[in-house]
Amino acid sequence: MITLPFRPPGEAPLAVLALGAHPDDIEIAAGGTLLTLAQRHPGMRVRYVVLTGAPERQAEARAAARAFTPGADLQLDLHDLPDGRLPAVYGQVKEVLEGVARSFRPDVILAPSPDDAHQDHRTVGGLVPTAFRDQVALSYEIPKWDGDLGRQNVYFPLADDIARRKVELLDKCYPSQHGRDWWGEETFLALARLRGMECRAHYAEAFTCTKLVIG
């Protein structure tokens, strides 16, 4: 096993682009990764882009973005495209992502998987390689009823306190989701424990990467 550090070229701060189809996608899938990176890279640049969300959900996303990236130089883009219908507004999703690509050059992208069972996640994930051609893109996973968790090939180990802080912040920032049967500490820590076992850590978040250039 080889460990590759998140280290931007030169002296520039680390730049991270976090893409979500819905409020809470980013934090469920990569909240521990963001908390760890914020701890390791004070002043890192983070661009948060969420494609759907009613006003209440956008307020939750705004609070979560700040909570999960403490000390970061944060830019937050919240859009109100139709939830559950992103394939029907494919052109608008493409315009949003291409606009971000023109104005922000990340070192790493955290994004939904193009193989995700949810149509909104799949639409965003499928457009990432066409909008961002020279960046490392890590496709995250989200546990859900569809049962689409797959075989991952990139792991980000999490310290125990980070994994538990992630769960605390999810509950704090997204009260609208508390009634959902899949929401909660058991789900989030169980997946983190499983992925940790796969990379010889206690907890971890896992991703897929289809292309990586090692310089």
Image (cartoon, helix red, strand yellow):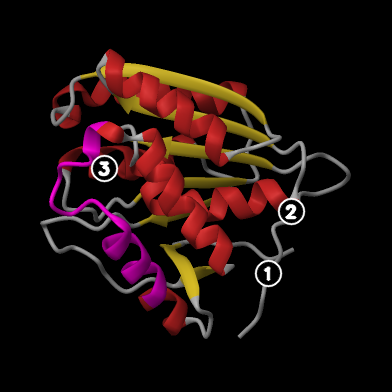
Kindly identify which numbered label has been placed on residue 198: none
Instruction: Say if 19 sits above or below 168 in the image.
Output: above
Question: In the image, 79: left or right of 162?
Answer: left
Viewer-proximal residue, 7 or 26?
Answer: 26
Q: Are marks 3 and 1 in contact (CB under 8 Å)?
A: no
Residue indicated by mark 2: 40
Q: Is mark 1 on a helix, strand or loop?
A: loop
Q: Main secondary structure of the magenta part?
A: helix
Q: Which of marks 3 and 2 is nearer the N terminus?
A: 2
Give the residue at mark 3. 121
The span picked out in magenta is 176-193
| Amino acid on which the number 2 mark rests in the picture | Arg
**Quarter of image, res 56:** top left
* Residue named by callout 1: 4
Identified at 72% across, 39% down, the residue is: 44
Residue 98 x/y as whole percent: 46, 25
Q: Position of residue 128 (x, y in %)?
A: 41, 41
Along the viewing direction, whichever of 68 and 73 lies nearer the viewer: 68
Q: What residue type is labelled 3?
A: His
Q: Which of 191 and 123 is in front in this view?
A: 191
Task: Say which element carries label 2.
Answer: helix
Q: Give the Cα separation between the discs numbered 3 and 1.
A: 27 Å
Q: Position of residue 188 (x, y in %)?
A: 33, 60
